[in-house]
Amino acid sequence: MKVLVTRPAADAARTAAALAERGHTCVVAPMVEIKACPAQIPERDYQAILVTSANAVRTLGPQPAGGALRGVPVIAVGDASADAARAAGITEVDSAGGAADDLVEMVRARLAPDGGPLLYLSGREVASDLPRVLAAQGFAVEQVVTYEAVPAARFPEAAREALAGGGLDAVLVYSPRSARILGTLAVQAGMMDALAGLVWVCLSPAVAESAREVGAARVVVAERPAEPALLAALESLTTQTGLATAPPKRV
């Protein structure tokens, strides 16, 4: 299949490689650009750092493994954010498996409300109110915004050309916000009719709801809000619809 990938550029490169391994081709069309925000980490004895996006760690530069955060363990929402923490030099990292609810359960199982504050590294806009949820469990959470996701100014030219050529089969959508931006830009570019006819493969029910709101007619939802499940949902389309793939890439 030929797939439209709407993730930010750094994440989309990894997704493109995973798609190639499965015999698919892709067109990268980021709906947001990740920009670092000035972030001052308070000097505290944190018992853990919480991360719900790889971008929250990448945009901090060398800080995670040094300074105020030296030696503080990380609980990441999923494998990608856990890998980003390890790449930043943090050695004690756990992955909750891909969903915010799983992260909350891991915090409750492993940490104590009276063990010290938690540091939550986040984007300016987040899908879940993690500090509020954990505060209800008795935890003190300090949220530090390390990045913002700036919407694309226009419908990406690569996506326009691919849609105009009629060669796209599906679009991968990772957040409700990305779905809304995609729909808005497609309408402005006069491409929504072509885009709506693709299969929209969505990371979660919330993403699927936004996709339908902007006009998606064919929606598939991953079993879990993690990229392996999203790619598995995409793979299922080849047997359900007969859409073709190229032979898997050999390495």
Image (spheres, rainbow, N blue to C red):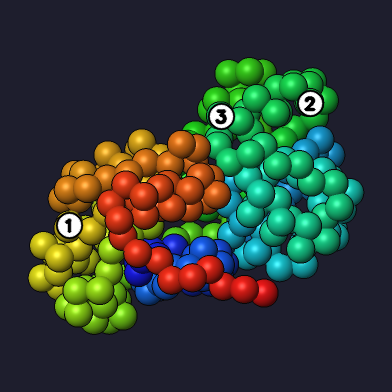
Is 75 placed above or below 154 here? above
Front of the two marks 1 and 2: 1
In the rendered image, residue 50, in percent from the top left (x then y), is placed at: 68, 42
Q: Is mark 1 on a helix, strand or loop?
A: helix
Amino acid tagged 2: Arg
Circle 3: is it few (<14), some (14-19), or many (20+) Cα within 10 Å?
some
Which residue is painted at 67% across and 37% down in the image?
96
Which residue is painted at 60% across and 23% down in the image?
135
3 and 1 marks in contact (CB < 8 Å): no
Is 26 placed above or below 119 here? below
- Residue 41 can be seen, yes or no: yes
Looking at this view, name the residue that lies furthest to the right: 71
Q: Which mark, residue 110? A: 2
Q: Determine which quarter of the picture holds residue 153.
A: bottom left
Q: How far apart are marks 1 and 2 (CA)?
A: 44 Å
Circle 1: is it few (<14), some (14-19), or many (20+) Cα within 10 Å?
many
Amino acid tagged 3: Asp
Q: Which mark, residue 224? A: none
Give the residue pinned by disc 3.
Answer: 101
Please name whichever residue, 196 or 239, is drawn nearer the observer in this view of the structure. Answer: 239
Q: What element carries label 3?
A: helix
Q: In which quarter of the image is the C terminus?
A: bottom right
Q: Distance between the residues labelled 3 and 1?
A: 31 Å
Give the residue pinned by disc 1.
Answer: 196
